[in-house]
Amino acid sequence: MIGEKQFVQNFIPYRTVVQLLCKQILQDDEAANDATQDVFLQLWLKHETLDMPANPKAYLMRMARNHCIDELRKAETSAVGYRTDEEVLAQLPTPEVNREERMVHREKAQRLMQWVRQLREPKHSLFVMAHFRHCSNDEIAETLGLSGGNVRVMLSRLRAEAKKLLND
C-alpha cells in the first residue's frame, strides 16, 4: 500500500519527465498533457492496493510508455495514423506505368498495409515510426525503450518480411 505522502514524495517529482516522454511518443503537447494526467490518475486509483515499486521512476516511465502506445493504437484506425487505407495509398508514390501495373502496385500496397496492421508491439510501432513517420533509429530506440542494435536487427528482419510479402 502506498500512502498519500509516499505517493507525493515518490511519484510527483517525475511529472515533468513523464510529460516529456509522453510528448516525445505522442508528438502533441495537448495529448501529452492528457496522457500525463491519465497516468497519474491510474496510479492514484490503485495506490491503496499497490506495493511501492523498488524504482518508482522506472515504474512510472514504463506505465507512461505503455499508456502512450495504447493511445496511439486507439488514435490510429489504420497502420500509419491516416483515417483510411485510401489516404495511406494516396501518400505512396505510384510509378508512371500502365493501368495494369498501377493495379498491381495498389494491391501490393494494400497487402503491406494489412501486414503492418497485424504486427504486434513493439514491431508495429517500430515499423510505423521508421517507414511512415521517418524517425531515426535512435529516436525509435529511445521512444520504445530498445537498444539501437535491437532496433537495427528488428527493422532488418521486418524489411525482409515485407520484401518477401511483396514479392510473393
Image (cartoon, rainbow, N blue to C red):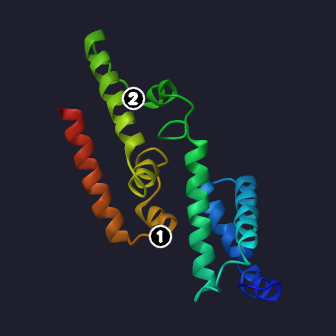
The amino acid type found where label 2 is placed reads Pro
Q: Calculate the distance from the C-alpha at mark 2 to the C-alpha at mark 1.
A: 32 Å
From this view, report whether residue 128 is shown above or below residue 113: below
Crowd band around label 1 with a 10 angstrom C-alpha radius: few (<14), some (14–19), many (20+): some
Identity, as a three-letter code, of the amino acid under mark 1: Gly
Residue drawn 24% across the image and 46% down it? 161
Give the residue at the far top of this rendering: 99
Q: Where is residue 18 in the image (x, y as percent from the top left)?
A: 67, 71
Please tell me whether mark 2 sits on a helix, a strand or a loop.
Answer: loop
Residue 141 % position (x, y): 44, 67
Position of 133 with respect to 47 (left or right) is left
Query: Nearer the N terminus, badge 2 or badge 1?
Result: 2
Quarter-of-image position of residue 16? bottom right
Residue 37 sits above or below residue 79 on the image = below
Left or right: residue 16 versus residue 101 is right
Name, please, the residue furthest toward the right.
Answer: 5
Q: Where is residue 23 in the image (x, y as percent from the top left)?
A: 66, 61
Q: Which residue in the structure is indicated by mark 2?
A: 93
Name the residue tied to disc 1.
145
Instruction: Give the image location of residue 87, x and y in percent.
Output: 52, 27
